[in-house]
Structures are given as C-alpha cells and as structure tokens.
Amino acid sequence: MSQPTAPVTAAARRPVIAESGTTRGRRARIALRTLQVVLALFYAFASSLPKLIAHPSAVDSFDKMGWGSTGMYVIGALELAGGIALLIPVLQSVAAVALSGLMVGAFIVQLTVFDGENAATPLILIVPLVLIAWARRRHNADLLRLVGLRA
C-alpha cells in the first residue's frame, strides 16, 4: 500500500544551503568574503607596496608629514599585515578594526597636513572595514581561546 504524499509547499521547494542558512545567507557570506579579498589586495598592493618600495610619491608624502622613511616603512608594514590578516578567519575582525584605526589616523593627517586633499578616501575605506569587523566578530572568541585568555 502506498502512503499519501503531502503537498509540496513553497518553503519546501526553496533550496537550503547546508545547515547554516538560506541561499540569501550564502550570497551574503560570499559577498562579504569577496569584499575582504578586494580590501586585502588593496592594502597589500595599492597601499602598502608604494611605501615598502619607497616610491617617490610615498617618500615625498612622509617627508612632508615629518615622519621620514621610518614612519613610511612602519605604516606600510602595518597595512600589509592588516591586508594579510583580513584573509585569516581568526584574525579578520581584529584586522578590520586595526585597519579602521589606521584609516582614522590617515583621515586626520589628510585634514591637518594635506589640507583635506584626499580626506574622503580613508572615510570610504572605513565603511567596509566596520562591516567586516561587525560581521566577523564571532571569530574574536576563537582568537581569545587561541591566545589563552578565555575558554
């Protein structure tokens, strides 16, 4: 004897991705990861590389600030480290917060030293960094566990 089949509802036809969420949630995770990769590439290459190879434009900017080559190399190294850390799951939230702090400093420098010439750029970069820091905040507990601060 065959069993009667229940009618298929719209909710039952909707594809479910794994156990963690819907197709919409999966798309959001992919979009966030793509944003992280784009920002990581930006910080690793477009932002830190000119500083680390002492490109003349970077040298001139840091000389005008009075920070010289030491400041240029330090900022370049911090940007490179932040860009790499954006790609490491346990570090991505902390990296986004740290890079946001660098961008606040860059904004202040743009206003005070360079008369606001490119002051909007750091502010524009802060928006996706804050989004990443908030969306990936659950990884902070994993990081704390790794460094032995909390179980």
Image (cartoon, rainbow, N blue to C red):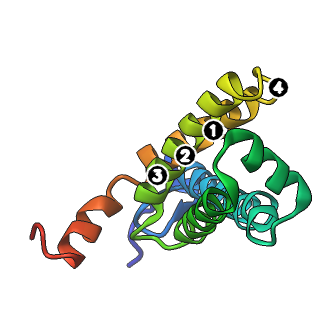
Q: Amino acid at mark 2?
A: Leu
Callout 3: 10 Å neighbours few (<14), some, many (20+)?
Answer: some
Nearer to us of marks 3 and 4 is: 4
**Label 1–label 4 contact, CB within 8 A:** no
Secondary structure of the residue carrying numbered label 2: helix
Q: Of residues 25 and 135, which is closer to you in this image?
A: 135
Q: Which residue is mark 2?
A: 102
**Label 1–label 2 contact, CB within 8 A:** yes
- The reply, left or right, for residue 98 in relation to residue 62 is left
Callout 4: 10 Å neighbours few (<14), some, many (20+)?
Answer: few
Q: Residue at x 27, y 69 (%)?
A: 142
**Label 2–label 4 contact, CB within 8 A:** no
| Whole-number angstrom distance, CA of label 2 to CA of label 4 | 17 Å
Q: Is residue 127 above or below residue 133?
A: above
- The reply, left or right, for residue 133 in relation to residue 15 is left
Q: Which residue is mark 3?
A: 98
**Label 3–label 4 contact, CB within 8 A:** no
Secondary structure of the residue carrying numbered label 4: loop
